[in-house]
């Protein structure tokens, strides 16, 4: 057994293809020879037929000349001319041959000599006789003509016999080539079978036996490398595989234990990562999030203490959020708050993990407090949110801990999760504050634009009432009292409408029922004929957008109550299809569009409705035709745009 690297590489396919190509070349050569012999035989047979026809043409031409000598018929003269031309054409065909048919005389000296004598006899005798007859000269005696014709026919017979003997030899060669072809086919088939057995089947059997022994766990099996082709390379590869399997089985148990320990460690890391991420995604206060996070980190890495600090906007101070088992001295140490005074402040400049091992020595007195508390190692890991560092968390060790690359990556990822959780809490608080501010602004605007104006009117009427009483003008005072009563009633209704608006709450999918309930309540309060129709089943809007649409309906009905004094019928139409449509129509007197435009700033209710429509991305139009129609349209494209209220 030897290595294939010491042998010149010869591909099995090259050897097989070379043998097959050689067999094909020899076979094609023999087949070509048989085809050439067949072509020669066919040409010789056609030459025999053509030469044999000369005998008939000779006697036929002589007979035609005898008939013409006794009867000078022009038709006989033309026949002699045609027969002579046909005679000459046959001789030319035999002399030059016709490869298309094929037809040609064999390339034999004796055949060529006989044909040359036939051609000379035709030119000196047969053709000369025909010319004499056609030109009116005397025809030779019949005996002489017969004698010359017989000699000419005898030469033709000799030519035919030579060609036949030549074809007999070629027929023998054809049969011999066919026998050779048969022998070659048999020999080639046997050679191919032997070659396939030698080059393919036997190596395959050897390889199969080796695989069967390998399947029976006989790891000592090796295959002999006898060739330098693909099977030799395959046998060498099988031997290398067997060597590696033997080595693998020898160290399998140790490697299984190593892989199991690695997998267990990875599973524990994933458990920590997923458990911490799940905890950070729960609803907790910021300090509770930090405390739960740092307790997990301390327990997981076996730290003796831990803390979380957040940076101020200028990144100069680090404020302690929570601490776990941290000594009181370090809790109150002022240098721990200053980024430039604390060892952990280096994490802010590097934006990566910082590990301080006090055994290796730390220049200066920065580590004095930590060393005095018995810590041999202090680590700091960044807390990031949106790629910006917002703080860091510390792990304190009395016995130094060697962090692996996987542990550092895990701590960096967990720092990202904590930073994102704190940032989400900050954004949620800002969003809630913004929502409260917006609602307060709407409430303040409503109070200022409605209640404040009503109270201002009442204040003016009270002053006028006091003036009348001072002047003892009771008649004028009696006229002011109803105005005061009406003003108080209107202010009361305004307050009630505002309270109704800001106390309304909806769940997702409750808009249709809430709109219908609002219309029914308005009907009970005013006694007007109020009809509500709805259609469509579109995708429900978020609750915050539904409440804005409900406020618009309430404000529109309030405007009907205040301004459409002669109206007695209101129609509310709600279409919830791809496009959301809310239309409120009353049969009041309507308004002057030009006058409405000039007093736009004084129409508080309309302005509030426009602002609410803008918050949900809808358009609000008001038309005065056979009453007043308020139409709110929310197109389908706007319904699927997220976070409209955040940008309102």
Image (cartoon, grey):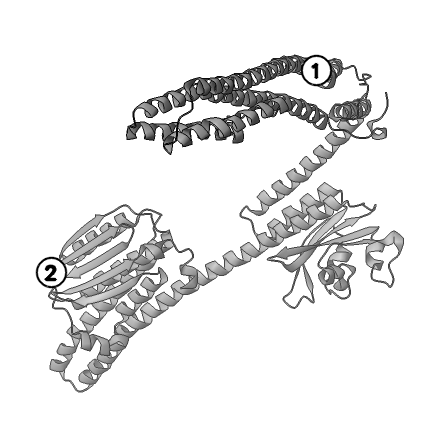
The residue that label 1 is drawn on is 191
Coordinates of residue 16 in the picture (x, y in percent):
70, 24
Query: At x 27% / y 64%, what residue is drawn?
Result: 620
Q: Is residue 86 above or below residue 397?
A: above
Q: Quadrant of residue 142?
A: top left
Q: Return the residue nearer the eye: 435 or 158.
A: 158
Separation of marks 1 and 2 at Cα, in angstroms: 113 Å
Q: Is residue 322 above or below residue 221?
A: below
Q: Is residue 435 above or below residue 86?
A: below
Q: How many marks?
A: 2
Q: Quadrant of residue 476?
A: bottom left
Q: Which quadrant of the figure contains the N terminus? A: top right
Please give left or right for residue 153 compared with residue 213 in the image.
left
- Within 10 Å of the Cα at label 2, are there few (<14), some (14-19), or many (20+) other Cα atoms? some
Query: At x 16% / y 77%, what residue is drawn?
Result: 480
Q: Return the residue nearer the eye: 407 or 25.
A: 25
Describe the element under mark 1 as helix, strand or loop. Answer: helix
Coordinates of residue 500 in the picture (x, y in percent):
29, 58
Please give left or right for residue 536 compared with residue 64 in the image.
left
Numbered tag placed on residue 568 in the rendering: 2
């Amino acid at each position: 057994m030897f290595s294939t690297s010491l042998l010149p590489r010869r591909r099995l396919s090259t050897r097989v293809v070379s043998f097959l190509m050689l067999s094909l070349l020899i076979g094609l050569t023999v087949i070509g020879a048989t085809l050439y012999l067949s072509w020669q035989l066919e040409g010789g047979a056609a030459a025999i037929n053509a030469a044999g026809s000369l005998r008939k043409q000779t006697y036929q031409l002589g007979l035609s000349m005898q008939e013409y000598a006794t009867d000078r018929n022009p038709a006989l003269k033309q026949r002699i001319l045609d027969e002579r031309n046909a005679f000459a054409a046959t001789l030319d065909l035999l002399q030059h041959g016709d490869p298309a048919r094929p037809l040609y005389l064999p390339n034999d000296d004796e055949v060529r000599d006989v044909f040359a004598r036939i051609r000379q006899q035709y030119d000196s005798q047969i053709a000369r006789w025909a010319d004499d007859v056609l030109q009116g000269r005397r025809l030779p005696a019949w005996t002489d003509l017969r004698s010359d014709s017989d000699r000419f026919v005898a030469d033709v017979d000799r030519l035919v016999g030579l060609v036949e003997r030549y074809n007999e030899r070629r027929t023998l060669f054809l049969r011999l080539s066919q026998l050779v072809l048969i022998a070659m086919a048999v020999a080639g088939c046997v050679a191919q079978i032997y070659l396939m057995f030698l080059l393919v089947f036997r190596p395959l059997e050897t390889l199969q036996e080796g695989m069967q022994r390998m399947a029976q766990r006989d790891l000592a099996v090796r295959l002999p490398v006898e060739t330098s082709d693909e099977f030799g390379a395959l046998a060498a590869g099988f031997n290398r595989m067997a060597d590696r399997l033997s080595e693998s089985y020898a160290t399998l148990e140790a490697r299984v234990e190593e892989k199991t320990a690695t997998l267990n460690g990875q599973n524990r890391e994933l458990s920590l990562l997923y458990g911490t991420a799940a905890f950070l995604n729960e609803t907790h206060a910021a300090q509770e999030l930090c405390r739960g996070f740092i307790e997990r980190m301390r327990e997981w890495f076996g730290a003796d203490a831990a803390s979380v600090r957040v940076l101020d906007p200028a990144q100069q101070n680090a404020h302690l959020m929570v601490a776990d088992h941290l000594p009181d001295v370090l809790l109150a140490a002022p240098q721990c708050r200053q980024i430039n005074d604390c060892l952990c402040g280096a994490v802010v400049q590097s934006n990566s993990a910082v590990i301080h091992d006090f055994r290796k020595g730390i220049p200066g007195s920065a580590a004095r407090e930590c060393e005095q508390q018995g810590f041999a190692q202090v680590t700091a890991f960044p807390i990031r949110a949106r790629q910006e560092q917002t703080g860091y968390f510390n792990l304190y060790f009395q016995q130094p801990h060697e962090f692996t690359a996987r542990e550092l990556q895990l701590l960096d990822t967990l720092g990202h999760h904590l930073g994102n959780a704190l940032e989400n809490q900050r954004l949620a608080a800002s969003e809630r504050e913004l929502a409260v501010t917006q609602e307060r602004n709407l409430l303040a605007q409503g109070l200022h634009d409605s209640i404040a104006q009503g109270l201002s009117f009442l204040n003016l009427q009270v002053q006028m009432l006091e003036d009348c009483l001072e002047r003892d003008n009771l008649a004028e005072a009696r006229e002011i009292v109803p105005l005061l009563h009406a003003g108080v009633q209107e202010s009361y209704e305004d307050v009630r409408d505002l309270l109704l608006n800001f106390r309304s709450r909806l769940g997702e999918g409750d808009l249709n029922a809430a709109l219908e309930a609002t219309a029914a309540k308005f009907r009970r309060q005013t006694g007007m004929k109020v009809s509500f129709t709805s259609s469509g089943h579109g995708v429900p809007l978020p609750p915050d957008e539904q409440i804005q649409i409900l406020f618009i309906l309430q404000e529109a009905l309030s405007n009907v109550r205040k301004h459409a004094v002669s109206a007695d019928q209101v129609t509310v139409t709600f279409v919830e299809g791809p496009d959301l449509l809310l239309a409120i129509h009353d049969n009041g007197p309507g308004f002057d569009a030009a006058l409405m435009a000039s007093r736009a700033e004084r129409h508080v209710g309309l302005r509030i409705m426009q602002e609410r429509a803008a918050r949900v991305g809808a358009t609000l139009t008001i038309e005065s035709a056979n009453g007043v129609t308020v139409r709110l349209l929310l197109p389908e494209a706007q319904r699927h745009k997220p976070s409209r209220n955040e940008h309102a």
